[in-house]
Each structure stands twice: as C-alpha cells, then as structure tokens.
Image (tube, rainbow, N blue to C red):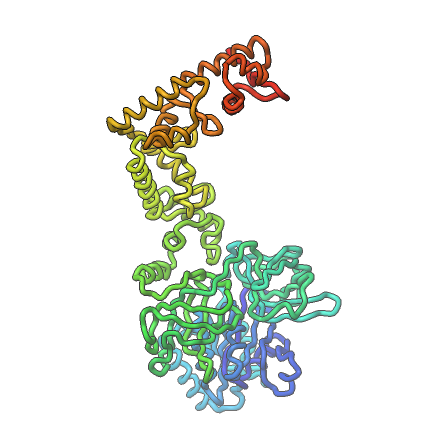
Amino acid sequence: MFVFGTAGHIDHGKTALIYALTSIDTDRLPEEKERGMTIDLGFAWMKLPSGEKVGIVDVPGHENLIKNMIAGATGIDAVILVIDANEGWMPQTEEHFQIIELLNIKYGIIAITKIDLVDQTRLHFVEKQIKERLKNTTFFNAPMVKVSTVKNIGIDQIKLAVQNLIPQMKPKRDIGKPRLSIDRAFNIKGSGTVVTGTLIGGTLHKGMEVIIFPSYKKTRLRSLQTYKEKVEKAFPGSRVALNLVGMEKNELHRGDIVFGTKQIKSSKNIDVQIQLLPQLKKHSLTNRSELFFFTGTKEILAKVILNQRKYFEPGETGFAQLRFKEPLATYFGDRFILRIPSPPKTIGGGLIVDPLAHKHHFKDKDILHFLQKRIKFDLRELVLTELKKNIFIKKDNLLINSNYANSEIKKVVELLKKQGEIIATNSWLIDKNYWQEQKTKFMNRLNQEYQLYPLQIGFPLNKFQSYFYYLKPEIFNYLIDSLINTDKIGFKKGIIFLLSRKPKMSSQQKILISKILKILKDNPTNPPNEKTLISQIAGGKEIIDFLIQEGEIIKLSDGILLESKNYNIMKNKLIDFLKINGSISIAQVRELLGISRKYIIPLLNKMDEEKITQRKENVRILKTKLG
C-alpha cells in the first residue's frame, strides 16, 4: 500500500484536488473551514481504476505552517506537486519542493490546477517555467496533468497517472521492526484514545503490545483501522489509526513514536550527513548554531557540531553531530530537515549516519573514516563500524536502530565470523582488533606477575578478573578459553599458568625451601601457621605459596601448614579407623593422632572439603566408600 502527499503554495488548490479525487474534505478544523485554508494535516484515500487504494496526506501551503507540511511528508512514497496555472511556481512551491528532494522522495506527479482561469498562452508559459525548474531533478520526467476541479477536468488523468506510477515504486519493507510516528491523537466517544500515522518497518495487529516513545509506556492495540476500515493487521506503508488501551490523549503528542518492538534505543547525540540548499546566503550554517530538526513527525531544537569547520557553504554536503536536550529514537538512514528559527527558513536536510552516536568533536580522524564507511549503506561495513565504535556489543542489540531485518544482520555476522573479522561468544560480538589487544594485554599481565613472583607456577584466576574488570564475565571466560585453546596457558583448580613456565629459584630461595620444610617436618603434631612462618623468615610468603602449588605443603583453615607427607599419614590413619569403626569423634581423633583440637578441626574440615569425610552430628563418617 502506498501513500501520496500533496505539496505546493497556499491556495493553489491542494485540498480541492483531493476532494475531487476522493470526495473527502480534508479540512476538518472549524478554523480551516472559516479561513478557507489548510492549517494542519488532512488525510484521505482514493480508489484507483485498478481497484487498488492509496492514501493521501494533504499538507498546508502557508509559509508559517511548513513544520506541519514536513510532518505530513513523513512516510509518503510519492508527491502530487500542485501548481496554480495563474500564479505559477511560487515561494512555497519552491520550499516544498526543496523539502521533497531533501527527504529523497523520488516519485511524483505535477498537477497544474485552475486551468479554467487562464488562456493557452499562460498555460504554456507555466508549463515551461515548471520544466525549467525541474531540470536536473528526478521530477523532470514526472507526468504533468492539467486540472480544473471546478469543471472536473484532468481528475481521471491524475488517478491514471498515480496508477501508472505505482509499479515503478518500491513497497516499504517489512523488517520486523514496526514503528509509527504519531501525527494526530484524539478521543472517540465510547472507544477511547486513537493515534494516527504512517506505519513503517513491520506489521501491527489487533491485541499486540506496543511501547510509546519517549514515555516508554506500554499499551495494547484494541483495534486498528486503515482508510476507515477495521483490520486485524496493518502492513508497512499503510495509513493507520490505532485505538490504544489505557492511554489518555494528553499522554500522546505529535512526534511520539509507537514501537512494536520491545527493544528501543535512544540517544541525545546523532551523527548525520547534512546537505545544504544551494540558494542560501554564505555561512548560513555555522558551528554550534541551533536549528530546528525535523524527522518523522518530531520537531526539536538541535545544536550543530560541524566536522572541524566554522561553517558549511551553500550547496555543500558534510558530516556533523547534532545534539539534543532529550533523547531521540531514530534509525540509521532516516531522513531529516533543518530549519533556522528566525526568520523561519529551510536550509537543508540529510540522513542519519549514526543514531546512537558517542559525543565527540571530530578531532579524531577515525571518526571521519567511521562515518565515510557507514555512508556506503553496506551492511557488512555497518556491522564492522558498529563493533569498532562499541568494541563489544550484545548480539541482540546489534543495529537495532537500523532499517535492516535481524535475519539480514545475522547472515552478515555469520559470514564475518567465518572470515575471522569478528569474534563471537554465545551472547556477545567483539571487535577483532580489540580482542587481539586483550589477549596481548592478558599475556603481558601474566608475564608481569611472573616477574614479580618468579617462584609461582601460576596465579588465581580471580586476580586477573579484577585486572580485566571492564570485560563482561562471559567475554572474560571466552578470553581464557581461547588462550587455553592456543596451548599458551593452562588452568587447573582456579589457577592460571603459562604452560612453558618453569619456576626460577635462586640459591637463597632453595635454602629457604629446605628451612621451611624442615620446620614442618620437625613439628608434625604442633605445626606453625602461615603468619608465624612469614614473620620469622624473610621472603617466606612467596616460598610458602610455591610449596603449596607444588603440593609439598598443605594449607588448612586458620592458616595452619602441614608437610604433605605428614598430612597424608594423618589422613590415611583416619580413613583406616573409619573403615573399621564407621565414625570418629574429636576425642578419638586426638587419641589417634596425638594432636590438639586446635589442629583437629582444620584437619577434618580439609578432609570434608576433599569429600573424604562428612560431618554427621558430632562425629565424622566416610563420605564415600574408599578402596
């Protein structure tokens, strides 16, 4: 389904033409009836000779109502440019046509109206004037129809021209991301609040839950209408009226968006490509100037940060960042219009290159390179630049604010994975260069630890988790797994280590090892704790950690240290006792091993930890049968 919009100067007969085509009077406001001019947007539809329906949006022609015209041009597929045969091409004809071009509307029909009021000489002059203005534009070969609504001349020809144009036009795509920019909100007695707009990006259906942006309020679609007919489902390109459950009219405004997706991303900064109109005065757009920004049906003040420039020249195209005081939910490739506030005037427009931009000032050359790649509209480049910007991003969040279907994005991601251009975990996508940097950084950090502690075989993994706190746990774990898979590092019992690493011992450290082992060997029933040994022996902590890793000593709770041989002797005595007797009390342990309660509890806790024993009331029993 397609939507046509009118354009043209005030009082050139746009509304009268629509009435002649549709029998619908789009001037609905009392003030419009009284003044005989269109003030706000009007909506109608017509049936073509083929039986197909098309929507029509009637826009105001007065220069003070351009913002309403821009809102009406949102989502239209083609334009009917209405020009009075008596007046010809006028100032608002020009501004409307500039807006049409800036919004990249490529299809249209020229309707020369009120031909009953002029002679053939005047009519030929106006035709020539129009052709001259349309030279070098996409509208140069647009069908031109001469019309009189009073004498019913040319009305059928307009319908036929519309019908002939439709096969050339591309239907709006269904990418599974339905959104509707609200152009009207009103109450219907007995039904509640209704909003209207042109649906793009996907389908909406009766009973569907939707989200209103920017309030993020959730509501449900009680019913839908397309061209006054109730429908179960509305498709992209349709003019739609949505009856919302539980919403008040004062909660909804022109410029709000109805989203049919659960994920909505917004930003106060967007990167854009701006195209200035060539007819402007010099320096019409200067750095840090404030302009009115129009996209969808939204109007908002924007601050313009130019690409390392003081100003843009008339007719120039360049990159800029637009900053807002409130977040906008725009999509990559969305079109926009820029107007100066005083005196109100359209100066240009363009397209959104990054709808979720980081705040910057274009000093970094990489930003310019980034935007130049995105402007190619190549999905592969979009995915890569998105990762370059974010470093890592959740798969479900990749290019949410784009006019691409998730299936299209997924297909490109899979190809890039195969080519080694991106790294993927279960949930995350990671920039290739950043990933390599993190692997190098990890190995450097591990080597630094070995330089600080040359006796260590390895280090607790949680120590490195604190160094790499900025990585999501899933990404950190994937980093470790990838390093293990390259046979560079090993991981055992919470300890990470270099596979090629062998402890380097000085002669002094060898002496300390012998000294510590002798102390533990000489005190089997009264072993020292770690703190005591460290206080007595300089450099003792590193030696103790090394001996624990090597399995030469066992560390119990409360820091008690046992020579491994001694621990195994005591452990085996307890196992043998339990095999015969079934259970053992603390008193029996004291009698069996000749050690005090101070050591008994940590010893039994260690055996519990190793799943050899388990506590049952006041005794220990074997946890499993041992051979």
Number of disc labels: 0
Q: Quadrant of residue 319?
A: bottom left
Residue 533 or residue 153, whichever sits in front = 533
Side (left or right) of 621 relative to 354: right
In front of the other: 473 or 80 = 473
Question: Residue 77 location in percent, x, y?
Answer: 50, 68
**As drawn, is 419 to the left or to the right of 589?**
left
Is the residue 10 above or below the residue 624 in the image? below
Q: Residue furthest left?
A: 507
Q: Quick check: can you spot residue 487?
A: no
Q: List the single residue furthest toward the right.
A: 190
The outermost residue toward the top is: 580
Residue 514 in view of the camera: yes
Instruction: Give me the residue at 64% from left, 76% from top.
Output: 23
Residue 65 pos. (x, y %): 53, 81
Pick the front one: 587 or 581: 587
